[in-house]
Amino acid sequence: MQDQAEKLRQLVGKMNTSHFSEPASTGGGTCRVVAVTSGKGGVGKTNISVNFGLSLSKKGHRVLLMDADMGLANVDVMMGIIPPHTLFDVLNGKKRLSEIIIEGPLGLKLIASGSGGIRELAELDDSQRDRFLQDLLELQSQEEVILIDTGAGLHRNVLAFVLAADEVIVVTTPEPTALMDAYGMIKTIYREKKNPSISVIVNMASNPAEGEEAGRKLVVLSKRFLSIDISYLGSIPRDMGMVRAVKEQKPILLSSPMSPAALSLTRISDAYFSGKIHSAEGNLSHFFKKVTLLFGGHAHG
């Protein structure tokens, strides 16, 4: 485990100092690349990713949601969409990236990873990578926000996406085990990434006070033991409307827009992205270059 951590640290150092060769520019354009992750499964991470994207799209922002959860790639399922093509088809050379993007409700765009789609990132040769990055440059000029729904936990393939993103949202619940796993994720990001931008959302809170107490614990722990400032974005109440929405494969922002959970999700997404959309400095192409470096290094390590 220590050897693996050291290998990751070396890759991140290389990632931060490398000068990547850029494919020919297609006109530039920047977008925020935000990874949504969690220390453990079952905390509602994908639900939050989907509804955040819908909330922003509803306000007229250009948003792309990418499913990067290798174990439980189910963003499309939660939205009631059957994707005809996935990222797997792009990385195998069968489709271009623009050909697999699905337009969902409210104009939210989706890239489904498909079986093995994310794993294929580790196997790209130089020409395949250049073609893929060129596609990303074109995509970057069209979107304002890219939300990456990662897997849960500290698996190396999850960390590749988390460490490559400029911003990370960690989702947890108030349960002590979930909080400790969330703190473990925060600590790993801190150890492997310089000046990380980390925010926390507490899901399934019994009441606002419980959510705030849980969020405050993570803020205090991170400040005291890691000397970093993380942001507590707010809590989302436990809501049977969310359970029904999952069963119906219809996001709660669409099925019950005035429910407590939907209103909290909208408020949190508004606060998080308010005033930041058009001043974004993120770079989608550079994000995926970092992913392929970290992911590839892990896959062969």
Image (cartoon, rainbow, N blue to C red):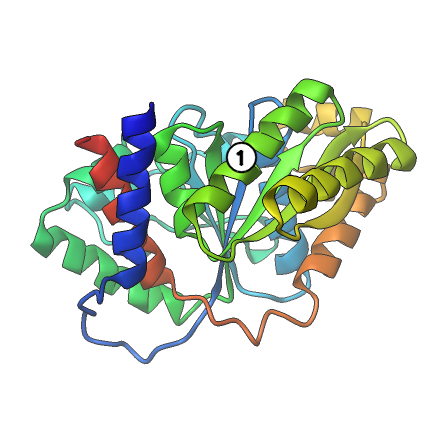
Q: Is residue 85 visible?
A: no
Rendered view: 80 above or below 135:
above
Query: Which residue lies under the disc numbered 1?
Result: 185
Residue visible at 43% across and 33% down in the picture: 69
- Type of the residue with mark 1: Met
Q: Position of residue 133 (x, y in %)?
A: 24, 60
Determine whether, in the image, residue 89 is placed left or right of residue 59: left
For numbered disc 1, what is the local secondary structure?
helix
Q: Is residue 279 above or below residue 203?
A: below
Q: Nearer the viewer, residue 69 or 91?
A: 69
Q: What is the crowding at mark 1: few (fewer than 14 residues within 10 Å), some, or many (at least 20)?
A: many
Q: Which residue is painted at 36% across and 37% down in the image?
A: 113
- What x and y, as percent, mark residue 60? 63, 66
Q: Can I make out residue 82 in this image?
A: yes
Q: Along the horizontal axis of the image, is 109 left or right of 141?
A: right
Residue 293 location in percent, x, y? 24, 48
Left or right of residue 88, residue 66 in this image: right
* Percent x, y of residue 76: 48, 35
Which corner quadrant holds the C terminus?
A: top left
Q: Is residue 147 above or below residue 75?
A: below
Q: Residue 80, located in which quarter of the rendered image?
A: top right
Observer-nearest of 221 and 81:
221
Left or right for 80, reference 126: right
